Image (cartoon, grey):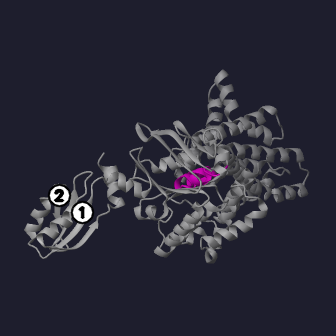
Amino acid sequence: MNKIWIITKRELRSFFDSLMAYILIVLFLGFSGFFTWLFGSDVFLVNQASLQSFFGISFWTLFFFIPAITMGLLAEERKSGTLELLVTKPVSDWQIITGKFLAAFLLICIALALTLPYYITVASIGKIDHGAVWMGYLGLLFMSAAYISIGLFASSITTNQIVAFLIALFIGIFFHLLFGLLASGSGGWFSGLFGYLSLSTHYESMARGVIDSKDVLYFLSIVFTGLICTELALSRRAN
Amino acid sequence: MEVFVEHVSKSYGFQKAVDNVSFQVNPGEIVGFLGPNGAGKTTTMKIITCFMPPQEGDVKIGGLSVLEKPEEVKKHIGYLPETNPLYKEMPVIDYLRFVARLQGVPAGRIHGRIVEMVQVCGLVAEKYKKIGELSKGYQQRVGLAQALIHDPEVLILDEPTAGLDPNQIVEIRELIRKIGREKTVILCSHILAEVEATCDRILIINKGHIVADGTAASLRKQAQNKEIVRVIIEEGNRDEIIRGLQGIETVELVDPLPDHTHAFEVQSRPGAGSRKAIFRLCVDKGWYLTEMTPVERKLEEIFRDLTVAN
């Protein structure tokens, strides 16, 4: 556990040292703030004290930002050779993977924590469904965990960060959009299957304030599948 | 802690990088690991350091197998990889702290170890700089410092003096020799003079096989079963001298040397010596024998013989 935390801390620091973290946080707050308060179906247009528009836009911004965070996690280490250094220290591959996963997850947590003023503001101007807001945040965290794990896997199979970014988006878009479209475009058994695979179905039910163990199980299984594939890719040690 | 490499094999696809390699390194011993590029040196190092497992065979370090207890084995190894990879964006001191923590150095000792390593590796003025801003030689010192930070029992260095200036090379060699008095050190290098100056024993690997194992002196002896002497004979006719030398029963070859009109290299038949006969020849003919030195073969030649011929 201690070793995992050492790796997480280094990774988090390098996010902030390389300005990557600041840029992403500013962009994330900018985008989500703009669409929550100023443009489109924002809070004032809907005229309801709810954060539905924020959760709707975060669903998309995080989808693009997470691969940008995860792309370098393993690809860069592989390219610069520091992976050899890390792997020959007394840590297991699992500790390395978990450490890096946690670093990206904590960065998302920080970004989301910075949106709490939105919540406080909306809560002060009207009657807000507190349960729905917390569920929505929980949904975002689950979704982020799933995409981080996919992004980490993408980063483990290449030495090129851009390639890792694109692979993560490519895998992600299936869960984010395509399975949902396939579900509505087909009928019966297929529709049910794709509907279950679609991440947006599970996210939306959480963003509406409903939590179901099925949804939690869904997100956790993506996370673990992603991490196991990462471990397999890493243990091959291919350059 | 002794290192036992037992019948280790590893291939990449169809190409066998290391083929049934076995050797042993004892504490207090510095072993030089030599071989041409692509001979399997780095692969062997990667297997010993648990970067990747061997396909066949096993490596035991202090009785612990790299296959069964890699986490334990890694605690006792300090490793400087060939490419010396470093986190370029980290300051030297933060990087050393990170490595020390990963290596499990007790929290109370970390600061002391870092101070000592910064001193020993000559990084005092650079300790707050980012690693990426340092010159190659200083980066090499950082690589060495991270390998030594946890005071490892086994030290594996792949080209440790690459990029260092001559003064630093001497210092680093001195340091390696000091460490090698108590610890087990394996040093990979292309620089034969370095290996000869630093190491107690030399291993030569070629095409995945160990082709030589011994001290520099014993390798010379093994490779050189013919006596070669350099002689300078004056006061005589050059051709007559050559004919005279060739006339000696035990002499196989006489080679005039370019640096002096009367200098020759005389090679004897295997197992025979001709120095007495040469002296007698000179006495008989009334020539002055002004120089007679045995020619030692250079390590480079031995290396070439072992790695090119077969």
Asked whether residue A85 is drawn in magenta, I would say yes
How crowded pointer 1 is (Cα within 10 Å; few <14, some 14-19, many 20+) is rated as: many
Same chain assignment for discs 2 and 1: yes
Give yes or no for contact between labels 2 and 1 (Cβ–Cβ under 8 Å).
no
Give the secondary structure at mark 2.
strand
N-term-proximal mark, 2 vs 1: 2
One can see residue B188 in this view: yes
**Which is more toward the observer, A201 or B176?**
B176
Relative placement, left or right, of B244 versus B180 is: left
Relative placement, left or right, of A202 versus B131 is: right
Q: Which dot marks residue B275? A: 1
Label 2 and label 1: CA atoms lie apart by 14 Å
- Under mark 2, the amino acid is Leu
Magenta stretch bounds: A70-90
- Under mark 1, the amino acid is Arg
Relative placement, left or right, of A90 versus B237 is: right
Would you say the magenta stretch is mainly helix, strand or loop? helix
How crowded pointer 2 is (Cα within 10 Å; few <14, some 14-19, many 20+) is rated as: some
Which mark is in front, 2 or 1?
Answer: 1
Q: Which residue is mark 2?
A: B253
One can see residue A129 in this view: no
Above or below, B92 against A210 in this view is below
Asked whether residue B233 is drawn in magenta, I would say no
Relative placement, left or right, of B294 versus A83 is: left
Pinpoint the chain carrying mark 1.
B
Q: Position of residue A116 (x, y in %)?
A: 82, 57
